[in-house]
Amino acid sequence: MDRRDFMKLTASAAAVTAAHRA
């Protein structure tokens, strides 16, 4: 797995979590 892909997944998960919390 590429580090860039990992960063993308992390950012996506963070966005989903933030949207779910809001």
Image (cartoon, rainbow, N blue to C red):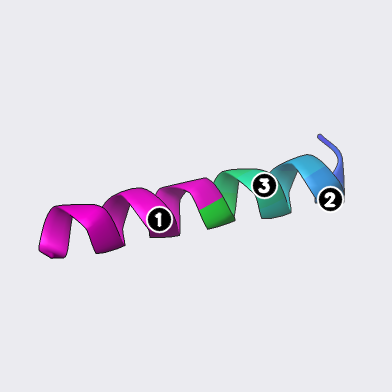
Q: Residues within 10 Å of mark 2 (few under 14, many from 20)?
A: few
What amino acid is labelled 3 in the image? Lys
Tell me: residue 2, above or below residue 14.
above
Q: Which residue is mark 3?
A: 8
> Mark 3 touching mark 1, by CB under 8 A?
no
Observer-nearest of 17 and 1: 17
Real-space Cα separation, disc 3 to disc 2, in angstroms:
9 Å
Magenta span: predominant SS is: helix
User: What secondary structure is marked by label 2?
Assistant: helix
Q: Residues within 10 Å of mark 3 (few under 14, many from 20)?
A: few
Q: Which residue is mark 1?
A: 15
Q: Position of residue 18 (x, y in %)?
A: 28, 63
Tell me: residue 12, above or below residue 11.
above
Question: Which quarter of the picture shows residue 22?
Answer: bottom left
Taking the spot 84% from the left edge, 50% from the top edge, the residue there is 3
Asked whether residue 21 is drawn in magenta, I would say: yes
Q: Position of residue 19 (x, y in %)?
A: 24, 55
Nearer to us of marks 1 and 2 is 1
Q: Which residue is mark 2?
A: 3
What amino acid is labelled 2 in the image? Arg
Q: Which residues are magenta?
A: 12-22
What amino acid is labelled 1 in the image? Ala
Q: Is tag 3's residue or tag 1's residue first in the polypeptide sequence?
A: 3
Q: In the drawing, what numbered circle is on residue 1?
A: none
Asked whether residue 2 is drawn in magenta, I would say: no
